[in-house]
Structures are given as structure tokens and as C-alpha cells.
Amino acid sequence: MTRPPRRHLRRALAAALPVPVIGLVLLVTSGNLLLPMRPVVTIEAKMASKRDFFQDPEVERLLMKHGFRVHITNMGSREIAKQDYSGYDVVFPSGQPAADLISRERARANRPVLLYRPFVSPIVLATYRDYAEVLAAEGVAERLPGSGSPPMYYTLDMRKFLDLALGKRKGVQRDPENGYRWDEIDDRNHVHNGNKILAQTSDICESNSAGTYLGLVAFVEHGNDAPDNEAEAERLARRIKPLLVEQGLPSSERAETYLSPDGQGIAPISVIYEHQFLAHQLRYKARKGETDDERVLLYPSTRFVTEPQLVALTGDGARLGELVSEDSELQHRAMELGFRARSTGSGASGDDLTRFLTERRIPVPTTSSDDTRAVLPSLPLLEKMIEIVGDCPDRNGTP
């Protein structure tokens, strides 16, 4: 006797059985009924730029495999720390100062938190090739060895860069209130931009990258040292304020502006995170078969490596923090998105990122071990400096 094809059996059953039973039959015949049914937990999260990781479709798939769905409320790091976060499982500011604010406030309320550091991403200054070459010709930037041809990465002498903004060029000081503009130092006439030579940041009242860059500028302007008392910090903040707000402080995400078609006309230099640039180059190479040679990075000779901390406020948040910090697939995906993963168990590290970029023929950023490591002011002093430079409103909206 000839056995009818299985698809005919499914059609016959579908015609004879109620809808719920049809679904059961289809699960059985497809084999999916044998898979474990995992409950899905929705994590409520506030995040800044590190939402790039959690909004990646592959990360979403991996998290779902482990029973997590992350619902993200997007806001700046300092804004996260300053606003109410009751009802949230995790908050993920982009750097340590905002996480410290949250930890300190929770400790005062006797509600401790758990902190996780799944990956790191240095602060960088993103620019365009013509501007980088103008700075190189000026002796302010230098091409990093092994950064490709044409070079994708440069090291930036922060002292000389700030001197240009303060009107000092090649040892000659003019009025400090009259800093140099791009078209004044471009001897080859490659850039036609009358803006002052500055790096633009996101809103300093909200953003970790902006606050970190403020700390970097303050460190350099204070003789490679952080201020250690309130009076000193206030004087320093007022002195460096023109170096950070002369061109305005746009509230939009700087990386999005930098990578947009009109980015070069909006801001010649933007403060972003390294992973945002590397992720762009990886996408560009996959799509076009070549790197984006018009966009390059400036690595400050005075460096500060940001350590974003995922702050777990609930038990479910702690489970998520452990997962993204220890799961090998998620750590590998973080590397594919340009992050320098930290997990020792997964093997994902800076060395793995180097191999990953090399395999895709994307130059590897290698900074000098001789670079100065910047130190941020203490948290209360940094907060005071941010408020002065940004004219930040308090929680009630009063400047």
C-alpha cells in the first residue's frame, strides 16, 4: 500500500481539526515542539551611545535565545544619572562618571547596585582627510604607523591643538580671544572653512563623551594634572569654556552627524567613540568592498579610555549584565561592532579585534604606549565644571 505524502496528511488534518489543534499538529510535524519553551523577560533600560550594541539585530537574536528582550529609552549619559530611574532594570551610561553618580545616589538610599563592564571604547576625535592633513602639515597631527595608505589614523598633539584654538601658532601668541580658523592655517588651500579650530561635542549637560572631553581639555590646560579643589576647578572651567562652546553644543548624537553626507560642512571635528567609527568602516567595507578613506580618526596624545558600566538595578538586570559580560557569542558580536571586549572567559580582547580587522583588510588603530594617560577630576569637581561650562539647568530646570 502506498503511503500518502506527509503534506497531504497535514491538509486533511487541517480540514478536520479545530484551529488550536492544527497549531499543535504543525508544531509536531515540524519538530519545533521538541524545542524548550523559554519565557521571555523584557528588560526596561535607559541607555546612551551603547544602545548601538543592544539595537543590533544579531545581538537582539542572541539575547532572545537566552530569554531576554531589551526595551530601550534613549538619553544622554549624564541625563540618565540626573533623572529618575525607578521602574528600570538597567541603566547603561557611556562612562564611569555617570555610573558613579547613580551608584552614589543608590548607596545613600541603601539600594546598592551591581556594575558590569562588558567592553571599552576610547574617546576619539573624528574628522575628514583634508582637515587631518592640514593639522599634519601644521605639526599638530602625525600619521600613525601601519594605519594604511592613505592613513586612516593620526595621533593629535592636544597641547598644540588647543594652542591653535587659543591663538598660538608656531610659538607666536596673538590675542587668546582670537583663536585660529581653518582657512588661516591651510597653506595649500584645501579647506574652505572659516570656523574656529575646535572639536564639537554633544550637549555637555547630557553626554558622557562631552564631559570626558571637558576633563581631557582641563587636564591638558592644567599642566597635565587634574584640579584638586573647588576654587581651582571653577577657575579652570571658566578658562576653558571657550574651547568647548564657541561653536555651540548640538544635542544630537555626534557620530550620526559625523557620518551623515553633510557632516563635513557641519563640524570638521567631532568627539565620538572609537567603536562608532570602526563599525562604520566594517559596514562600508561589507557594502562597497573598500574602506571609507575620506573619514579618519585623530587619537589624542593625551588619552582617556572610557569604561562604560552597565548598572543593574534589579535581579533581571543583573542576569542581563552577567550574560553580556560573559557569553562568548555576545562578546564576539561586540568585537564585530567595533568594541574592545573585556571578558577573559570568551577570549575576546584587543588582540581579537586586531585579528578581526586585519582579516577584513581594515587598518588597525595602534596608539603609542608613550601617550599620556589623562586623569579626570574627582566626581564632585567634574560635576561643578560641567555645570559651569555648559550652563546646565538643575533638576528643576533652573540654570
Image (cartoon, grey):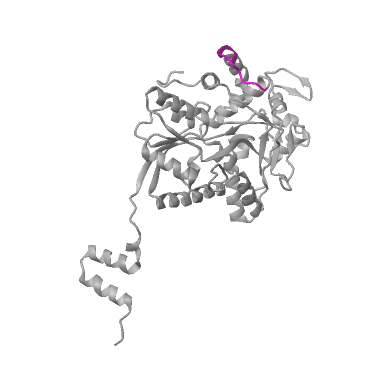
Give residue 26's position: percent from left, percent from top.
30, 67
Magenta stretch in the rendered image: 224-232
Q: Residue at x 55, y 32 (%)?
A: 209
Q: Residue at x 58, y 45 (%)?
A: 338
Give residue 2's position: percent from left, percent from top.
31, 86
Q: Spot the residue most to the top.
A: 231
| Residue 202 is at least partly visible in this image | no
| Side of 9 where 259 appears, left or right | right
Q: Quadrant of residue 370?
A: top right
Indicate the quadrant containing the N terminus: top left, top right, bottom left or bottom right. Answer: bottom left
Q: Nearer the viewer, residue 180 or 83?
A: 83
| Side of 170 where 200 appears, left or right | left
Q: Nearer the viewer, residue 381 or 234?
A: 381
SS assignment for the magenta stretch, majority: loop
Give residue 140's position: percent from left, percent from top.
74, 31
Magenta stretch encompasses residue 266: no
| Residue 104 is at least partly visible in this image | yes
Q: Quadrant of residue 127?
A: top right
Q: Residue at x 49, y 35 (%)?
A: 309
Q: Residue at x 38, y 41 (%)?
A: 43
| Side of 235 where 155 appears, left or right | right
